[in-house]
Amino acid sequence: MYRTVTCGDLRITHVSQSVTLAGWVQSSRNLGGMTFIDLRDRYGITQLVFNLEDNEELCLAARKLGREYVIQIKGTVRERSAKNANRPTGDVEIQVTELVVLNASSVPPFTIEDESDGGEELRMKYRYLDIRRNPVKEKLLFRHQIALETRKYLSELQFTEIETPYLIKSTPEGARDFVVPSRMNQGQFYALPQSPQTFKQILMVAGMDRYFQIVRCFRDEDLRADRQPEFTQIDCEMAFVEEEDILITFEGLMKHLFKTILQIELPDFPRMSYDEALRDYGSDKPDLRFDMKIQHLNDSLKDKGFAVFDNAELVAGIVCKGIGESYSNKDINDLTDWVKRPQIGAKGLVYIKYNQDGSLKSSVGKFFTDEQLKELAQKVGAEAGDLLLILAGTHDATLKQCGELRLEMARRMNLMKPGEFKAFWVLDFPLLEWDEESQRFFAMHHPFTSPLPQDMHKLNSSDKDTLKSIRAAAYDMVINGAEVGGGSIRIHDRALQAQNFKLLGFTEEEAEAQFGFLLGAFEYGAPPHGGIAFGLDRVCAIMQGSTSIRDYIAFPKNNQGRDMMIDAPSALELKQLNELGVSVMQK
Ligand code: ASP
């Protein structure tokens, strides 16, 4: 037996027991005749003591142990004279009687401490050492808890976990596919699934009724900090349901996760339409931990002689509570530079400070009377001490910029409190999205999403604006400004699905070639169905207030999509390429 207890087990109640422990040498200290070693495993750290006087040979052997050596010891548990209250095992130590070195270790390239001295790339290269660090290990354990509780909750509700294939067919919709050449069918390629969407729908046609899968999805997109080329979804589908059934079931899942894992009772999720979200927050995934709704100011500020406003489609702003007087000219200039950055794209920023003494200061003071600006304050709920920030321009862009400004001000004003969660649903997304560049409609969610019944009649229209106004039975779950999940009620009627493909610019032949299997399945008694998928990595990150999903992935890729540890992707030998029937152009 390598061990009788782990490094996290021992307490004062175990004093005088004989134990065997195994683990890694975290650190060692020589103090006169004593050598202390901190022994670490996944469960904790236990202090070992070697006494020179008691056993010289053993103590000298202990002094030779380097960091991260793997050792096994036998000894007796005793009470520590200097206790360590920060450690669960801190009341005891092991008086060691036997030591076996199970494996030596080279000096690790960074310290295996909570705060490591290793840069991110280095830690990714030596991910096995990084995972030995508490913060990384804890995140993987947290992820396991989420997956486990998800399985429990869904299984309880008769969901069945079913695996769908990873080698599937490439489709031009959505993101770019990762593709895999087929050796047995030269010149042909599989694609790795962006999601198991069509398979889970087919499982509903197959009568499985309730499906879920914790499943890897692959998207060959340009990477941002919170994106990974492969990520994990909690993917779900239900038959014989309406939107309401899905919302209740999966609001329930999220409440279950928060309750069992964080001991937080989430209140019922508010619901808002996509249109409301954009109108009030300039985003389809607003952060509702703070209010600061966007104020629409056309009525008060347009056509009063200030050309910037007069020429704008939309004048809108946000009220920042209580910072009017503390916000200096420099702060305003900083903020103006910030909104003008290309990522935000505003032309400028107008401010009005409502001072405590009733006076006001504004960058547009010459164009408006104090009376007008005070009336405006009344209208938008600005009080003495508040700062009103205003942007103007085209409708959609200005709303989006206001949304960004709202978030930035919340950051600067420290309004996003860690440990606070605001979860809600955004409903009624548009079915279609017009793409100027390719002059065609794309599915906002995906091509299998059903229009809302009350908008169904508009599908036959040839008017672009009418088509744009069709709402879908599509929903997103948003927590603290992040989309954690999204889904829709699906089309289950062959004719309607064919009509939708047509709207999306597919010819009948293209639709048949790419999705014939689904259209075919719809001919054999497809039940009404709908579903949702959550980003597991993202759910973990949000629940722990982390900004990066990478931390929750055992072996993530870097910003160039590389696995630094195994050094992938890599070139192939000519022989292998030939076998696959793939020729590669030399750069
Ligand atoms: N397959 C969709 C996605 O990956 C989710 C869904 O509609 O269930 O976004």
Image (cartoon, helix red, strand yellow):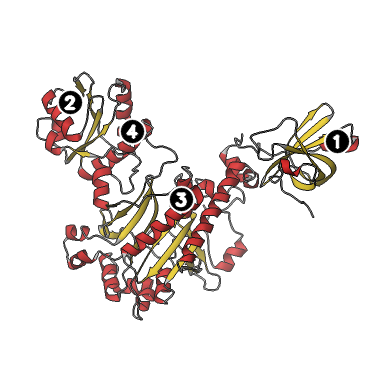
Of the residues under marks 1 and 2, which one precedes in the sequence? 1
**Callout 2 secondary element:** loop
Residue 354 has which mark? Answer: none
Q: Nearer the viewer, mark 1 or mark 4?
A: 1
Q: Nearer the viewer, mark 2 or mark 3?
A: 3
Residue 258 has which mark? Answer: 3
Of the residues under marks 4 and 2, which one precedes in the sequence? 2
Quarter in which the N terminus is drawn: bottom right
Q: Label 2, label 3: how many angstroms apart (C-alpha)?
A: 47 Å
Residue 59 has which mark? Answer: 1
Relative to 33, does residue 142 appear above or below in the rendering?
A: below
Residue at 83%, 36% in the rendered image: 50
Image location (x, y in percent) of residue 487: 36, 60
Q: Residue beneath label 2, please?
A: 364
Q: CB under 8 Å between callouts 1 and 2? A: no
Q: Amino acid at mark 3?
A: Phe
Of the residues under marks 1 and 4, which one precedes in the sequence? 1
Residue 421 sits in which quadrant? top left
In the figure, is residue 305 to the left or right of 329?
left
Judge the density around disc 4: few (<14), some (14-19), many (≥20) Cα neighbours within 10 Å.
some
Q: Label 1, label 4: how many angstroms apart (C-alpha)?
A: 59 Å
Image location (x, y in percent) of residue 527: 35, 75
In the figure, is residue 333 to the left or right of 189?
left
Q: CB under 8 Å between callouts 4 and 2? A: no
Residue 409 has which mark? Answer: 4
Q: Nearer the viewer, mark 4 or mark 2?
A: 4
Judge the density around disc 2: few (<14), some (14-19), many (≥20) Cα neighbours within 10 Å.
few
